Image: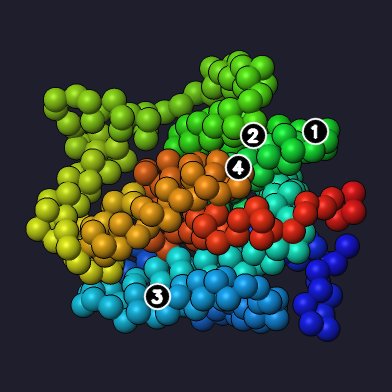
Amino acid sequence: MSIRSGRTYWPVWVAPVAIYIALVSGAGNPIRCSESVCEVQIGLSMLMVFLMVPALLLIKYSPRIILQVILLLLSAWCLALSGNSELPEFVWSKSWGGLLASAIILIYMSHVVLYYGHIALARGLAVILFVVLLATLLFKIWHNGLLDRDLAYIANGPIVFGWLMGIGGLAAAYTYLKTQRMSSLLLWGSLSVGVLWSVSKGPILAYLISCAYLMLMFARYCLLLKCILIFGAALKIIEFDETRFMLVATLMESEIDYSEGSVGARLASYETAWQLIRSNYLVGIGAGNFAIYEPLLMYPHNVHLEILLEYGIFAFFIYLILLCRAIFFGESWVRAISIFMTISMLFSGDVSYIRYILPFLLLGTTISLKMSAPSRQYGGT
């Protein structure tokens, strides 16, 4: 099966592969910043060209989608030029990795949904991320670090790997619930193991909630109970150290120990962020400027909080509208992924990682069921 764009025929798996590349690379974002130091690696920007040229050939959609892509690109440009940050490269990194990547991902997503339907896109993402899971497994075994969380998950750290596995797992769950195909059930189970393998608390918690939400939408109560039992048994086996889950418990205590590792660092950054918001809630403190106040952390490790802090109440209100609309009116798997990433981004990531949620929010608000094409079997299988 192929996707036709003008005189060019694109295999249906091209879009999911391109989406994965854009997610992990930030569309070839060449700027890496940590502890107020930014390094530029120009070679990575070639990935953007590799992704953008086919995307432009595919952009045969409704004027609404074209307008959204244009607005994303303009927003990326304005974000890169805004503020008086002491780290302009950091702002460029946020703009490139967050908004430019989101525009590219939205193009590929929209094309598959409009021509082939939601099931084709969901199954395509699930298959590609299953391949990523297998490749990561082989990579970790080769380096004798199957259970070593400090060894990279190929191109990702454990948290982002958990995000990817969660997105793939929810996509596979949706295709199984819609088609009842055993292959989709196997994909769902395998990618769920991938989420647990990341041993990242935020993604695991978000995944459990999102899967439950998806099964409730399909009224699969018995399946939900079985999944709860299976995940409960798996969580009993995994030994968690004291990290992000402690945030919830710690916030409920009257006294906070800021020396308590990553929990303390995050709590301290949240407190700083809220203090700044109270005096800058209208227009924010400016893109990337949290790094001025917290040069070691660079960003508050809460994407929603960062939007409110750096861009102000009006930008946050628009973001909130997109989020609520996608959760309440999007296709069921888009709703589940939006919930998954909303919870996950409470604990990790900055605006450059908004590419993991923004395309889904825009997909959920742009393409209705009436606009999308009838679902077809992915890859002719």
- Report the residue at 16% width, 59% height from top: 281
The quadrant holding residue 179 is top right
Q: Would you call the spot at circle 1 few (<14 residues within 10 Å), some (14-19), or many (20 or more)?
A: few
Image location of residue 375, percent across then percent down: 78, 51
Badge number at residue 332:
4
Residue ID for mark 1? 180
Q: Is residue 10 left or right of residue 130?
A: right
The answer to which of 50 and 183 lies nearer the viewer is: 183
Tell me whether circle 4 and circle 3 mark residues in contact (CB < 8 Å): no
Image location of residue 186, percent across then percent down: 78, 34
Q: What's under tag 2, amino acid-wise?
A: Ser
Q: What's under tag 3, amino acid-wise?
A: Ser
> If you read the primary sequence from the N terminus, does the residue marked by circle 2 or circle 4 appear first?
2
- Report the residue at 62% width, 72% height from top: 62
- Report the residue at 31% width, 30% height from top: 248
The quadrant holding residue 171 is top right
Tell me whether circle 1 and circle 3 mark residues in contact (CB < 8 Å): no
- Image vertical order of residue 144 relative to residue 355, above or below: above
**Mark 3 to mark 2 CA distance (whole Å):** 35 Å
Residue ID for mark 3? 75
Q: Would you call the spot at circle 3 few (<14 residues within 10 Å), some (14-19), or many (20 or more)?
A: some
